[in-house]
Amino acid sequence: MKYTLTYIFASILLFSCGNKEAKKIGSEAEITTSTEINSVERETPEVAISDALPVFNFEQLEAKYLKPSDATTTYVINFWATWCKPCVKELPYFEQIRTDYKDKNVKVVLVSLDFPEQIDKQVVPFIEKHQLQSEIVLLDDPDANSWISKVSKDWTGAIPATIIIKGDAQQFYEKSFTYNELETEIKSIL
């Protein structure tokens, strides 16, 4: 039963992942290359990527990031997956925000919705290949029906999805971002 729910959730995410604009299959706009990911200027890694990522259930994720005790830090939490093209396309913008706003008490957290058994074969190699430096965790909680609405009552479960939190202020977005759009939303909550 647990695996059935997991596969149903994965199917929902797979079919709902995408921009709300129609695209031709194979179009230039749909293809994300490693050049696009690496186009953001990189700095020296702060911490080397380990053999595995932290894996949280929803309660752990909620306690650490969605209900932070630090009211002075702005949390930019992005829900994504390695197989989601719009998610991958916007990752450089989150990385650039991490760099541009690190002195302004902004913390970027990338929450992977990939399957836990894919950490070593897919997720960690993806992170290394694209030199992602933001904090990354994997959410392993197959009961999506119980936690999606806890992130936001407006969330249908589609990804990419982002929540920006500072103290009691929260803004939720079920969409892809450009750098300028993301920066504008962060500035509005700072």
Image: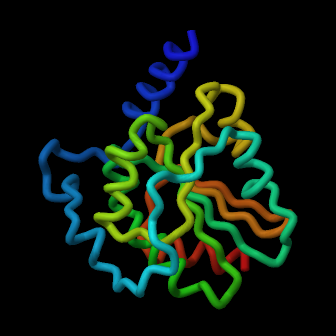
Determine the residue positioned at 45% across, 65% down.
Answer: 49
Left or right placement of residue 82 versus residue 13 in this view: left
- Which color scheme does this rendered protein use? rainbow
Say which quadrant the N terminus sits in.
Answer: top right
Left or right placement of residue 24 versus residue 153 in this view: left
Determine the residue positioned at 57% across, 77% down.
Answer: 184
Give the answer, above or below, for where 8 lies relative to 61. Answer: above
Can residue 156 be seen at all in this image of the molecule? yes
Residue toward you, 149 or 5: 5
The residue most toward the front is 51
Which x, y percent locates residue 100? 53, 87
Which x, y percent locates residue 119? 42, 45
Can residue 161 be seen at all in this image of the molecule? no
Determine the residue positioned at 67% across, 64% down.
Answer: 164
Residue 140: which quarter of the image? Answer: top right
Which x, y percent locates residue 175? 48, 53
Left or right placement of residue 186 versus residue 112 in this view: right
Give the answer, above or below, for where 147 lies relative to 81. Answer: above
Left or right placement of residue 15 versus residue 76 in this view: left
Say which quadrant the C terminus sits in.
Answer: bottom right
